Image (spheres, rainbow, N blue to C red):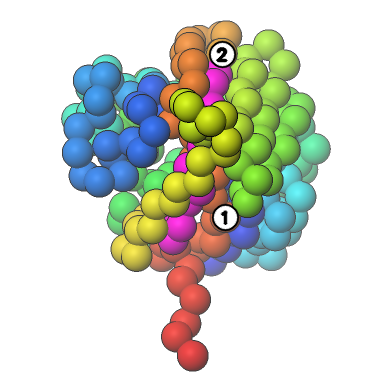
Amino acid sequence: MTPWEIKGRELVNCTCEYGCNCQFNALPDKGHCHAVAAIAIDEGRYGDTRLDGLNIGAIFKWPGAIHEGNGEAIAFVDRRASDAQREALLKIMTGQDTAPFATMFAVYASTVTTMHPPVFTDLQIEIDVDARTGRMVVPDYVEMSGRPIRNAVSGAESRAQIVLPEGFEYALAEIGSASSRTSGPVRVEIDDKYGQFARLHLNNHGVVRAKAA
């Protein structure tokens, strides 16, 4: 198994209301799950191949709950990546060189029946986790934007977090609102639903957690 590790920031938008039932081992509130994900890798490596500064994204579409399978997906990889970096990123994104079900990449890959060919393209990704703002633009494929949840009465920003001490994606996520429109083989439309902003630190064995002092 080739050792790998990435640190970065993510924005995920799905069709659930704020909170997302999947985060609590419950069924999706719409009966299905459609999702768009953007990840900006700040630092990363796959063996001796550096992954710093590269962007990746994906669109997912499951007809029911994620664990029931039959999902459809397409992956986007930064055009700037070299051949070695592309291969490394695709292996990570499809759960290869990873302990069984240790990361969200491995979990989701196990539930996808139709994986469209990856697209190597320009990914414009901006994510500010603390501000709960972000966007991803993939020309001809994706437009996603995220923002803070607003109080329905006062209009003030409302802040909420999800903490998963044993999660396979993040330790803590800031929750906001997000919207997405996609084109191409996997079409999704999401308006002001669950937006997840998180700092990622992952390796072959899952989330890298801070050690107690």
The residue that label 1 is drawn on is 199
Percent position of residue 129, x then y: 62, 48
Binning the other alpha carbons within 10 Å of mark 1 as few (below 14), some (14 to 19) or many (20 upward) gives many
Give me the residue at 53% from left, 66% from top.
3
**Residue that protrudes farthest toward the front in the picture:** 154
Sequence-first disc among 1 and 2: 2
User: Which image quarter: residue 134?
Assistant: top right
Magenta span: chief secondary structure: strand
The residue that label 2 is drawn on is 181
Q: Please state if 67 lies on the left or on the right of 185 as rendered.
A: left
Percent position of residue 167, x then y: 35, 57
Q: The residue under label 1 is which amino acid type?
A: Arg
Give me the residue at 36% from left, 28% from top.
17
Real-space Cα distance between discs 1 and 2? 24 Å
Percent position of residue 85, x then y: 69, 47
User: How many numbered marks does the figure carry?
Assistant: 2
Region in magenta: 170-180
Q: The residue under label 2 is which amino acid type?
A: Arg
> Which SS class for mark 2?
strand
> Which SS class for mark 1?
strand
**Residue that protrudes farthest toward the right in the picture:** 80
In the image, residue 174 lies in the stretch drawn in magenta: yes
Give me the residue at 68% from left, 11% from top.
140
Q: Please state if 16 lies on the left or on the right of 50 as rendered.
A: left
Residue 3: assigned label:
none
In the image, residue 107 lies in the stretch drawn in magenta: no
